[in-house]
């Protein structure tokens, strides 16, 4: 008997991990996850979009519209930056898997940290100035961009803990 066919590729596998990380996000409108992986297929770090440590997510706004201080945008740390900041070691030469193409602020952090490859799924903001800036910087810095089409869709149905 031969080996099983149809297994996940490394890119599909690690994008699945990014999706799993996104499930930790409490953002009601956009859940993004990221996974950083080294050249030996070892997970270095994960992250998701949320408020900084010590900032109670019940005390900060999740709104998308309104004044700057009335929306999430001034406060939320993106998945990519969280993964970089949470890493216990250098991410130099690593690949980052992210469910949504990085914004220009995350692109700067990705480039500065030495990540050499970005694997992404959604590019729904492709025509925005922020993403156009990201792509320009990635190209200048020699960061490889790979869009992945085949990903696993994680649907998690929590089972209530009856031991409480």
Image (tube, rainbow, N blue to C red):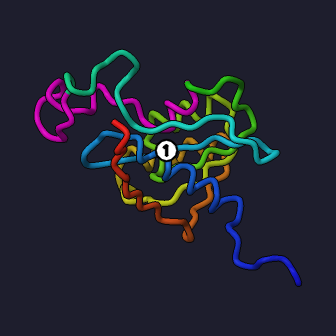
Question: In the image, residue 19 lies at what x, y percent?
Answer: 49, 53
The residue where tag 1 is placed is 21
- Is residue 155 found left or right of 149 in the rendered image? left
Image: magenta residue range: 61-85
Picture residue at 12% right of the left edge, 29% below the top: 67
Answer whether residue 75 is magenta in the image.
yes
Which residue of the protein is positioned furthest toward the front in this rendering? Answer: 163
Q: Name the element at disc 1.
A: helix
Toward which corner of the image does residue 109 lie, by quadrant? top right
Specify the quadrant that holds the C terminus.
Answer: top left
Find residue 35 and report its horizontal and vertical position in percent.
59, 43
Point out residue 47 in the picture as x, y percentages from the top left corner: 51, 36
Q: Is residue 65 left or right of residue 162?
A: left
Q: Between residues 154 and 46, which one lies in front from this camera angle?
A: 154
**Of residues 138 and 44, which is closer to you in this image?**
44
**x 42%, y 35%: residue:** 78
Quadrant into which the N terminus falls: bottom right
Q: Quadrant of residue 25?
A: top left
């Amino acid at each position: 008997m031969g080996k099983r066919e149809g297994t996940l590729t490394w890119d599909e596998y690690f994008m699945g991990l990014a999706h799993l990380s996104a499930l930790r996000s409490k953002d009601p409108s956009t859940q993004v996850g990221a996974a950083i992986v080294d050249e030996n297929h070892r997970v270095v770090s994960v992250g998701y979009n949320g408020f900084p440590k010590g900032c109670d997510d019940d005390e900060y706004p999740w709104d998308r519209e309104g004044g700057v201080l009335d929306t999430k945008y001034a406060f939320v740390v993106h998945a990519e930056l969280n993964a970089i900041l949470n890493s216990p070691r250098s991410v130099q030469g690593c690949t980052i898997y992210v469910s949504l193409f990085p914004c220009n602020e995350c692109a700067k952090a990705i480039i500065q940290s030495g990540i050499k490859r970005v694997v992404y799924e959604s590019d729904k903001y492709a025509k925005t100035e922020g993403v156009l800036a990201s792509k320009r910087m990635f190209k200048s810095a020699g960061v490889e961009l790979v869009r992945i089409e085949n990903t696993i869709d994680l649907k998690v149905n929590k089972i209530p803990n009856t031991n409480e």
